[in-house]
Image (spheres, grey):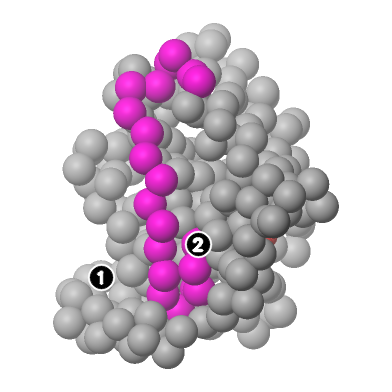
Amino acid sequence: MTDTSYQTYEKDARWTAVDHYATRHLDQSNSFSAALQYAKDVPAREGLPNIEVSQMQGKFLAAQCQLINAKHILEVGTLGAYSTIWLASTAPDVKVTTIEINPKHKEVAERVIKNAGLEHQIEVLLGAGVDALPKLRAEVEAGTRPKFDFTFIDADKPNNLAYFNEAVLMSRSRACVIVDNVVRKGALADAEAAKFDDKVRGSRDVVEAVGRDTRVLQSTLLQTVGEKNYDGFLVVVIK
Ligand code: DHB
Ligand code: MG
């Protein structure tokens, strides 16, 4: 029988306590601290869904960008630009291109970005990933836009694989692609759940395709717990 005990997993007080502890000790305040707080508060006040990455996850993404000295960053799924601010804050010469389907989210994101003083580093494109990404790719292929060093995929989950494939086609050698929310409280490992949950299906599609993809140099799946519950990142390095 299929084990569906993941469905009962809920936020654990220890995970939240450790996130708070880590924040107290590791939140070296930087010039973006106030802007990051604004990027949490304003979208929440505007009624955007509370599904942005946690602070420690934002710092993880920023650390990956700094490790590979990423200058051209792609994000699919802007929401209120919280992760976008983390990505753009990694160096003053970083450029982030981020795609958002919802005009209201884009408007809030642009306010948040302006408040951070990052409007010259961040371009928010309005549209569905499946429309915007091929247009971007045409520019990359025409040489009018540089290849990306780092991509964060954090949008509608059923399209994870389509977004991954587009990202690979726009990636430089040794670029990193990270996909958010693939673990889904453990449902990832449940083939039955994939039959009725298209977000689980989309997560399994991308994980399984990455495993077969000869363009991939390295891949791992990092399970995470914390104030955002039990989830995880798919982390991929492109050949
Ligand atoms: C969902 C999407 C997210 O990007 C996230 O971080 C958490 C949950 C969702 O659609 O369920
Ligand atoms: Mg997410």
Residue 141 percent across, percent down from the top left: 53, 11
Corner quadrant of residue 227: bottom left
Tell me if residue 31 can be seen: yes
Residue 76 in the magenta stretch? The answer is no
Q: Secondary structure at mark 2?
A: strand
Residue 78 seen in the figure: no
- Residue 223 position within the rendered picture, expressed as x and y whole percent measured from the top left: 41, 57
Q: Is mark 2 within 8 Å of ligand 1?
A: yes
The residue that mark 2 highlights is 231
Left or right position of 86 against 213: left
Q: Is residue 225 magenta?
A: yes
**Quadrant (top left, top right, bottom left, bottom right) of the N terminus:** bottom right
Residue 164, percent from left and from top: 56, 31
Q: Which residues are magenta?
A: 212-231
Residue type pointed to by label 1: Ser
The residue at the point 44 percent across, 51 percent down is 233
Q: Is residue 108 above or below residue 122?
A: below
- Against 21, residue 50 (above or below) is above
Q: Please, which residue is most extreme toward the front here?
A: 1
Residue in the image at 67% along x and 23% along y:
134
Q: Residues within 10 Å of mark 1 (few under 14, many from 20)?
A: few
Location of residue 50 by image quarter = bottom right
**Where is residue 55 shown, x and y percent of the image?**
38, 71
List the residue tagged with mark 1.
31
Residue at x 33%, y 22% (from the top left corner): 217
